[in-house]
Image (cartoon, rainbow, N blue to C red):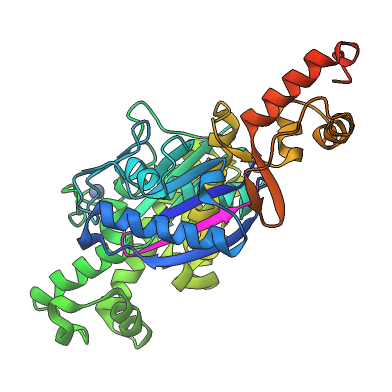
Amino acid sequence: MSHLLALDLGCTKALVGVADAAGTILARRRIDTLVAEGAERAMARVAAALVEACAEVGLDPAGAAALGIGAPGPLDRARGVLLDPPQMPWGEAPVVELLLAALGVEDLPWRLDNDCKVGGLGELWRGAATGASSMVYFGVGTGVGGCIVLDGEPWHGVSDNAAELGHLTVWMDGPECGCGALGCLEGIASGSGIERRARRAITAGRATSLAHHGDNVRGADVAAAAAAGDELAIELLEDAATALGVAVGSMVNAFSPEVVVIGGGMAARGGGAWLDDVANRARAASFGPNRDASRIVGPALGEESVLHGAVHLATHAAAQAPPRAGVLVTLQQASARIGQPESYFSLHRGRFEDHARIPFPPPVRSVAGKDVWTFESLAAWDEARRARDPVRRGTEG
Ligand SMILES: [Zn+2]
């Protein structure tokens, strides 16, 4: 298998990476998404960043085995289309088609999923939940998303959009969420939810040191005011921690997962003391043997959870895709593809070139100091060789 391409498509930043076949990220690039310029131009910039990252390690995107993408939901995984995510108002955006066209490789195998699910997969694959067969991941940032893994597989549900943990009701008559419902986790615990609640309290004339920010109050202002003892700010952050604790405790009661990972920007800013506080609230909200059976931890991959998860998606896409026409391979990769030892082509090439009976196909080019061929040209040569060499058509090849 050849190298893998990965994309974490965020509303403000996009992170791309190129990984080797084992999933180790070799090079990455971070660019501005510039949502306002539209999907086509954003994907063109992403493609250029992928070309750059590949070039840094002497690779070519056209020779990649597969592409994995984490992007804001809702989305249609089967068609590779974003369904007008709130902070990416592109309507129905065929991001996969646009990206493959910009890369000039329409037949590259790919997988797309919701960024929070992909972030959860990253933590499961290479991060805080490595080795767990069940996990619940909360991504707490501007919004709140989630990923539920059962028996090692992410759960998508009948709608294909399961694990919308941000819209768990945690406060029956609580504040209005961006989705229109009352008391959703996202409306209380997310950055945007905290800001919205602060704005409303200021508008309602509540005494607070945040008043002078008016409609421009930001999450960071609330955190600073809380640290300085502002009553409203403390209350908002307390509510956020309680809401998240209740949601985590409910998930622990429902699924008894091995691990709960609380990731995202809020978690990164909150640090260890904040996580301990949320975990204690979660335990208070969970029941019986479930209470202490689940580990509640922070992420291990920092801002790269989604990128690692996207690499993981790419490994799946590559493993399940039929061999592509025109993919460039080394002699070792071609040997592996036909189930032979690494030295297979090198060995036979030497033997048959010496006798000049069947000329070996010329390499297409050299990538990172290694010659590469189309798989088809090597397979055709091997077939011709076998036809001339009936004695050796057996298991040895
Ligand atoms: Zn909601």
**Quadrant of the drawing holding the C terminus:** top right
**Quadrant of the drawing holding the N terminus:** top right
The residue located at (48%, 38%) in the rendering is 108
Q: Which residues are magenta?
A: 11-20
**Is 384 on the left or on the right of 43, as rendered?**
right
Q: Is residue 226 visible?
A: yes
Instruction: Tell me where residue 188 appears, x and y as whole percent.
Output: 28, 60
Depth check, front residue: 140 or 88: 88
In the rendered image of this protein, does residue 329 appear above or below residue 17?
above
Residue at far front of view: 356
Depth check, front residue: 161 or 337: 337
Residue at far left of view: 204
* Image quadrant assignment for residue 30: bottom left
Asked if residue 18 lies in the magenta stretch, the reply is: yes
The number of numbered discs placed on residues in the rendered structure image is: 0
**Is 276 on the left or on the right of 349, as rendered?**
left
Asked if residue 143 lies in the magenta stretch, the reply is: no
The residue located at (65%, 39%) in the rendering is 373
**Is 284 on the left or on the right of 192, as rendered?**
right
Instruction: Tell me where residue 382 appears, x and y as whole percent.
Output: 75, 24
Q: Is residue 287 visible?
A: no
Instruction: Tell me where residue 48 appears, x and y as whole percent.
Output: 41, 59
Depth check, front residue: 38 or 212: 38
Instruction: Tell me where residue 292 appears, x and y as whole percent.
Output: 60, 49
The residue located at (41%, 38%) in the rendering is 106
Depth check, front residue: 215 or 392: 392
Q: Mostly what secondary structure, the magenta segment?
A: strand
Residue at far top of view: 390
